[in-house]
Image (tube, helix red, strand yellow):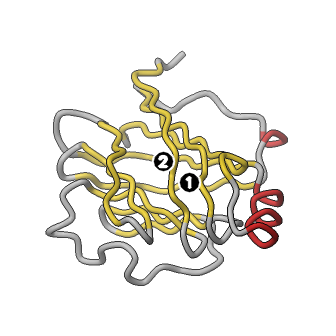
Amino acid sequence: MTELVQQVQFDADVGYHSFCLQESDDADLPVPYPDDTVFGQFLTAFPGRIDIFSAGHTHTAAVTAEVWAGRPPEEDPERWDEYGECEYVSTSGVVAVWSMSLGHTEHSVTLSDSGGTWQVQVYSVGRAEAERLSAETGTAEGVERYLVRFWRAA
């Protein structure tokens, strides 16, 4: 069984239905966030960047990010509203959380001491309620929740 190396929890500021996990040092990225964001697509991978599309327009999502020593155990798909998987290449080993309205936030996830290629799974739940509250009240706090899992690619 593979080992959970690290778990980090934080709030992500969602604006215009999205937030992003992007290389901490974005100076050399060919397509920095929010350029070329794909509206309506749950998970979009770019070099050094992963865009996550939220059901709610403007709100705060609760995120749990995990780093694993290998592929993590499978999640029960019935627990989640949405799921996506992609590859992520990091030059620094540090992934920062980016917001449409705030840009680079204070939240980050350290994957390793150096760069590398990672597999990423992203799960989400609470999407319908976040969409409803965002439309009715203009915001929602922690209603939409995400689980993001990283592990080194083979």
Give the residue at mark 1.
85
80 horizontally vs 65: left or right: right
Q: In which quarter of the image is the C terminus?
A: top left
In the displayed structure, 124 sits above or below 103; it is above
Q: Is mark 2 on a helix, strand or loop?
A: strand
Q: Residue at x 44, y 61 (%)?
A: 20
| Mark 1 → mark 2, Cα distance in angstroms | 6 Å
Q: In which quarter of the image is the N terminus?
A: top right
Q: Which residue is drawn at 30% across and 61% down?
A: 48
123 horizontally vs 134: left or right: left
Seen from the viewer's position, the closer of residues 35 and 149 is 35
Seen from the viewer's position, the closer of residues 92 and 73 is 92
Q: Is mark 1 on a helix, strand or loop?
A: strand
Circle 1 Cα neighbour tier, 10 Å, few/some/many (<14 / 14–19 / ≥20): some
Location of residue 135 in the rendering, given as x and y in whole percent from the top left corner: 78, 73
Q: Are marks 1 and 2 in contact (CB under 8 Å)?
A: yes
Give the residue at mark 2.
120
Location of residue 139 in the rendering, given as x and y in whole percent from the top left corner: 68, 62
Question: For the view shown, which residue lies furthest in the front direction?
Answer: 137
Seen from the viewer's position, the closer of residues 34 and 60 is 60
Q: Earlier in the sequence, mark 1 or mark 2?
A: 1
In the displayed structure, 77 sits above or below 85; it is above
In the displayed structure, 144 sits above or below 56; it is above
Find residue 150 and report its image quarter. top left
Location of residue 75 in the rendering, given as x and y in whole percent from the top left corner: 70, 34
Q: Which amino acid does label 1 sit on?
A: Glu
Q: Residue at x 73, y 67 (%)?
A: 134
